[in-house]
Image: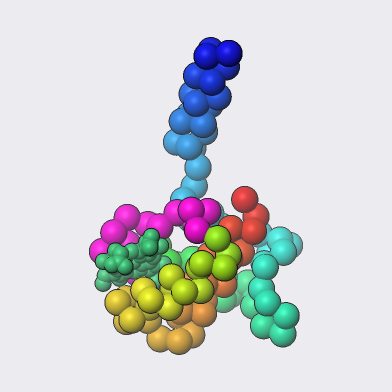
Amino acid sequence: MKLSIFAALACILVSCQSINYAPAVETSQRTGAQKGQHINWATLREGRILFVHRCIECHTLPVVWHYTTDDWPKLVDSMSARASLKPTERDAILAYIIAARAQM
Ligand code: HEC
């Protein structure tokens, strides 16, 4: 019993090391975008670049699956003032986060 818990823990620890914290988003993947929202591949790519550059200025890169899809819009809103993001940059980052999260 104890052993299996350790095995599971070891598994989690080892796999964590190989996780990409800002994974590329597959175009074929469901983006989790809301209805009527036009999200294209260029936006997701831009969002990913902005995310890894701008969201790492004050803290380590936030882990996308640590927060829910419902929490992210509020988080990015509150951070976009801090990161001085333009509305389009904010939208691109959010689209990337939601899409990256959806493919995990
Ligand atoms: C100018 C500094 C700064 C920048 C740039 C910044 N943050 Fe933050 N962030 C903070 C600080 C300070 C905190 C600590 C919590 C707080 O004060 O709200 C934080 C906390 C967070 C948290 C944890 C919030 C919680 O309640 O657990 C997340 C997630 C986050 N930031 C995401 C982002 C994202 C995404 C971006 C890029 C758009 C970003 N941050 C850019 C300063 C920054």
Q: Give residue 42's position: percent from left, percent from top.
A: 58, 75
> In front: 100, or 35?
35
Which residue lies most toward the front here?
1
What scheme was used to colour the molecule? rainbow
Left or right: residue 70 versus residue 53 is: right
Identify the image quadrant of residue 70.
bottom right
Identify the image quadrant of residue 69.
bottom right
Residue 94 vertical position relative to residue 18 in the rendered view, above or below: below
For image coordinates 49% across by 47% down, the residue present is 20
For image coordinates 72% across by 85% down, the residue present is 36
Give the main secondary structure of the magenta stretch: loop
> In front: 25, or 101?
101
User: Which region is colored magenta?
Assistant: 54-67
Q: Is residue 17 located in the magenta-colored stretch of the structure?
A: no
> In front: 86, or 71?
71
Q: Is residue 96 visible?
A: no
Q: Is residue 17 visible?
A: yes
Q: Give residue 37's position: percent from left, percent from top.
A: 67, 83
For image coordinates 64% across by 59% down, the residue present is 102
Quarter of the figure that contains the N terminus? top right
User: Quarter for ligand 1?
Assistant: bottom left
